Image (cartoon, rainbow, N blue to C red):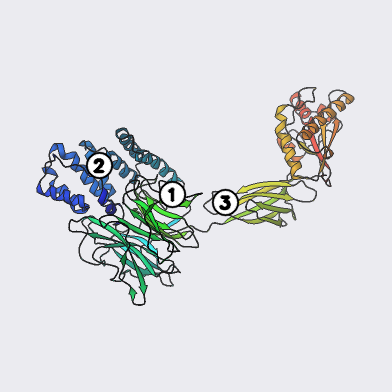
Amino acid sequence: MRFTLKALVVLFIITFSLDGVSQTARIRRADALFEAGGFFEAVEIYRRELDKVSREDMGFYLQRIADCYRFVGNARQAELWYSKAIMRDAPNPKVFYHYAEMLKMAEKYDEAIEQYQKYKELVPNDPLADVGIKSCELAQQWMASPSGYEVVNLRAINSRQSDFSPTYASEDYSILFFTSSRDKATGSRKHAGTGEKFTDIFVTQRDRRGNWSDPRPLDESINTAYDEGTPSLTADLNKLYFTRCRTSRRNKLGCEILVSERREQGWLTPDPIPIAADSMVVAHPSISDDELTLYFVSNIPGGYGGNDIWKVTRTSSSDNWGEPVNLGPEINTKGNEMFPYIHSDGTLYFSSDGHPGMGGLDIFRATPSNGNGWEVENMRYPINSPSDDFGIIFEREREAGYFSSRRRDVGARGGDNIFLFYLPEINFNMIGRIRDDKSGRPLANANVQLVGSDGIIANVRTEDNGSFRFMLNPNTDYVLIASREGYLNGKGRETTRGLTESKEFDVDIELTSTARPIELPNIFYDFDRWELRPESMAALDRLIEVLNDNPTIVIELGAHTDSRGSLDYNYDLSQKRAQSVVNYLIERGVPTERLRAKGYAQSQPKVVDEQLAQQYPFLQVGAKLNQQYIDKLSNEEQQETVYQINRRTEFRVLSTDFKAD
């Protein structure tokens, strides 16, 4: 991960004053290496010379050892040495923050939160502590509920060293350029900061069988004994932008962006793009499709923290680049923002350790919002992991591509690896049945209409077994309307919003026959009264919904009493009860012409059907619950139950041809 934190923070890492610290000559050599970014070599010297460090300086150098391991990407060793530094009272409070970061990368979230809180107590004005705490909470949620992406290690091209920052080099995505410190890289020297060779840009090609060729270094005009990497190609694939980092006499690291043009004989000698001084970091180019905007990473003055993402623009591809413009606080934080990638649709992808994330660097998606701002979201697990994740690219037509990660997964080799990712095709199917709500028998030749929030309307007829099928679209709400002659319309609802995996919906819709009265359950009145009780309203509101779903029906509301009391009195009471229901419906907008009120007193006792017999086993199917039947029941409790069954409110359909004015 040469062009990630271990290299680009070298010029502005938080250093500690060495005044008053006793040093051996070797430790002074290690300090010089540390200041210049030679963390890999420095840590070996520090560890060998640790027994020569005084008691009062021990915490300082334990923290330095931990910092070295953090910069070279060895989170496990960094975690161990930060804990030692804390036990020996390391002088810089940042030790708690970095220890928390390493614990987070080890998925020790509760312990990490504790260390973030300790750091916050010491440095209350640093927002990174709150970001870290929030990150731990989010990471656990994201791992418990991953996004729909599939991630596969690209073992065919990964080496035992670091391989990262791929980019497409052909229109059919069969050629990849990427950065690597593998043994085939140019030169023989090893980087003092990583212990690996200086990186080069490599190329590999996939054949028709899907096999990748053995990666080979790009032309000598591109690769040198210095670090080259993070390639970005123009849309026509004929211009290559990339990063080169040079080592000066003082071993300080400076990075610049170069551009080379492709000719028949290969890549021409690249030209640097003058953006900042040689001692500054200018790296990680990403060129827009129109070649008028170049995004990059830099630590030039005017940023918000460590490395920021900037851009330069021009009015035509032949013009000079303008002045650098920082992408602002919605993108850039007090931490490090790196590896920008501008998608052809205008979406910006980048990596950051300053936004809430799962581990070290996380990959973020930024979409332009109204005005000049951005809406930034974490790409979550499994694109992101507790380790560093960065350098993502996409195909134009679909959610698929490659990215780099230092995660420790099955098949990972070396430091950074390149991973394939894709969003599997998601299929949503609906299989349903239409049935009679009383008998349960399937209803053939019923019409089922599907209405989607995306504007799609589809109709099908049910099969002989009452079944129907629909294919559904993602992120859509659906309403199902089932209809059949002689039945009230039925309705169902489903949604595919937020679903990231394929799903088969199983739907049953029951239709109610208009050939028989339909009881309204839970219609209550006080004894000897006709005013509706409040608990009746829910059932009547459902009736209003039925009337709205069946706008052409005219219904009769029939109220029934039990057989106690005189017939004339019960007729009057039941008529008033039926009218109170009608009045309620009219008050809520149902046209008067669609409603009739009818009081039946005890003239139509209930006839027991299968459902009622299942609910009350002492009743027989087909029995008419008149007074003669009631008198034969064995006890008063059963008699009172039958009286209650007879006290009911029903509606029946009188006609189906109502037309509103």
Residue hosting label 1: 380
Quarter of the image with the N terminus is: bottom left
Residue occupying the far bottom of the picture = 264
Give the residue type at disc 3. Answer: Asn
Q: Give the amino acid at mark 1.
A: Arg
Taking the spot 45% from the left edge, 69% from the top edge, the residue there is: 171
Mark 2 to mark 1 CA distance (whole Å):
27 Å
| Tag 2 near tag 1, CB within 8 Å | no
Q: Position of residue 457 (x, y in %)?
A: 68, 55
Closer to us: 636 or 252: 252
Instruction: Say few, some or many: other residues with alpha carbon within 10 Å of mark 2 (under 14 / 14 to 19 / 20 or more).
Output: many
Residue 196 point in image, percent of width and height: 24, 59
Label 1 crowding class (10 Å Cα cut-off): few <14, some 14-19, many 20+? Answer: many
Disc 2 + disc 3, Cβ < 8 Å: no
Q: In the image, what residue occupies the spot 30% across and 52% down?
A: 5
Name the mark on residue 475: 3
Q: Amino acid at mark 2?
A: Tyr
Query: In this view of the protein, can residue 308 be seen by the observer?
Result: yes
Q: Which residue is mark 2?
A: 82
Left or right, residue 532 beside residue 151: right
Tell me residue 455's x, y (percent): 65, 54
Eyeballing the image, is 374 above or below 131?
below
Q: Quadrant of the C terminus?
A: top right
Q: How far across and how far down the image is residue 366, in percent?
A: 45, 51
Q: Separation of disc 3 and disc 1 at Cα? A: 19 Å
What secondary structure is found at the residue carrying circle 2? helix
In the image shown, does 240 or 487 lie closer to the viewer? 240
* Residue 627 visible in rendering: no
Mark 3 surroundings: few (<14), some (14-19) or many (≥20) residues within 10 A:
some
Q: Earlier in the sequence, mark 3 or mark 1?
A: 1
Which one is earlier in the sequence, the residue at label 2 or at label 1? 2
Instruction: Say whether residue 221 is left or right of residue 609.
Output: left
